[in-house]
Image: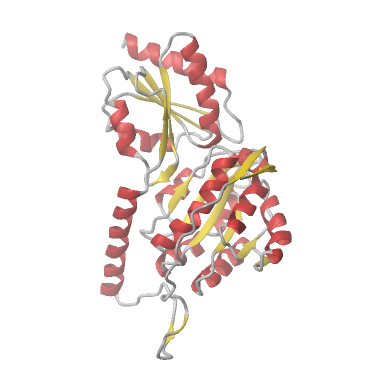
Amino acid sequence: MERKFMKGNEAIAEAAIRAGCRFFAGYPITPQNEIPEYMSRRMPESGGVFVQAESEVAAINMVYGAASIGERAMTSSSSPGISLKQEGLSYMVGAELPGVIVNMMRGGPGLGTIQPGQADYFQATRSAGHGDGRMIVLAPASLQESVDLVQDAFDLAEEYRGPVMILADGMIGQMMEPIEWKEREKKPAPDTAWAAGSGDGGEPRFITSLRLDSGDNERFNLRLQEKYKLITGKEQRFEAIDCEDADMILVAYGTTARIALSAARDLRGEGLKVGLFRPITLWPWPSDALLRLARQGSVKLVMAVEMSAGQMVEDVRLAVRFEKPVHFYGRTGGMIPEPEHIAQAAREALKQEVTA
């Protein structure tokens, strides 16, 4: 097993190459610039193609083109750039094209700041561009998990024929941690009989998201919804730490979850039973697992912790079905929460519920 100390963005790029990515199109934006920079060197070495596109719009449409012929393709950007890719994402959903998109989030709105943020949650989890499309959204909390999830993302994209997003914050991209490059189980080559080209009889196969007949388009949409039900049933991922005896459960994702875990352990040191629930799939959200934990008799409240003004907290409320109080603590605009501030917010929330 190979072990290496790497920067987050470079580890993500290397993971994509090891997963068989053979086409990458990107455009510079902080804090993800090391991904295209690394790809520009490594992709030609691996027999793939790197293109620095003229814009984010061009990059996502190049990925659409590469995916149309059955190639494993990826693009990356950060918050404003991902906004520009929304049209192309919807086209990929409408054409059922697999592909991986990395969003290394920064603080917004607008151009905002280059500091980390988590305020793209709604954009990622509510739809893939316009229309009723969805995409699997994976949220790593460490560089090892980033590497593993990037490699998983290509498999998931091909299994369900659609885009998959890695939703990380700028800290993931810029930090350095040791990576273990594991031997992954080799899966059978995916069936790409759907890809653009010529069939066995020479008939052309076209890729398009255009369906002018409303009946045809409705049938397609209903089939998509059935696929999303399947994904929701099979692909929910989460981590629960010290939740089985908890009086209070903190819910956080990405690097914020690491900070929240420090706060939870500090509170345990004070005698307060606090656990952490970390969704790894932000869509589909692991609602059943959180509801089961929240329904424990010991749990008095749940508190969402985010680097936003409050977005994931809505999914937390839906998950617990308003059966337990849900509180919120967040920093926004590129500010990073600190363990002591989370702990203080937790103490105040717990006191409020006990005295209510």
Nearer the observer, 50 or 180: 180
Relative horizontal placement of residue 8, taking residue 243 as reference (left or right): right
Q: Residue at x 46, y 14 (%)?
A: 268
Q: Residue at x 68, y 58 (%)?
A: 39
The reply to whether residue 213 is in sight is yes
Nearer the observer, 86 or 267: 267
In the picture, the quarter occupied by the N terminus is: top right
Q: Residue furthest bottom?
A: 202
Badge count: 0
Nearer the observer, 276 or 330: 276
Q: Does residue 246 sit above or below 80 in this rendering?
A: above
The x and y percentages for residue 260 are 51, 25
The x and y percentages for residue 17 are 61, 58
In the picture, the quarter occupied by the C terminus is: top left
The x and y percentages for residue 193 are 42, 76
Q: Does residue 223 sit above or below 250 in this rendering?
A: below
The x and y percentages for residue 181 are 60, 47
Q: Residue at x 41, y 67 (%)?
A: 96
Colour option used: secondary structure
The reply to whether residue 129 is in sight is no
Give the image quarter of residue 296: top left
Relative horizontal placement of residue 323, taking residue 146 as reference (left or right): left
Relative horizontal placement of residue 252, taking residue 60 as reference (left or right): left
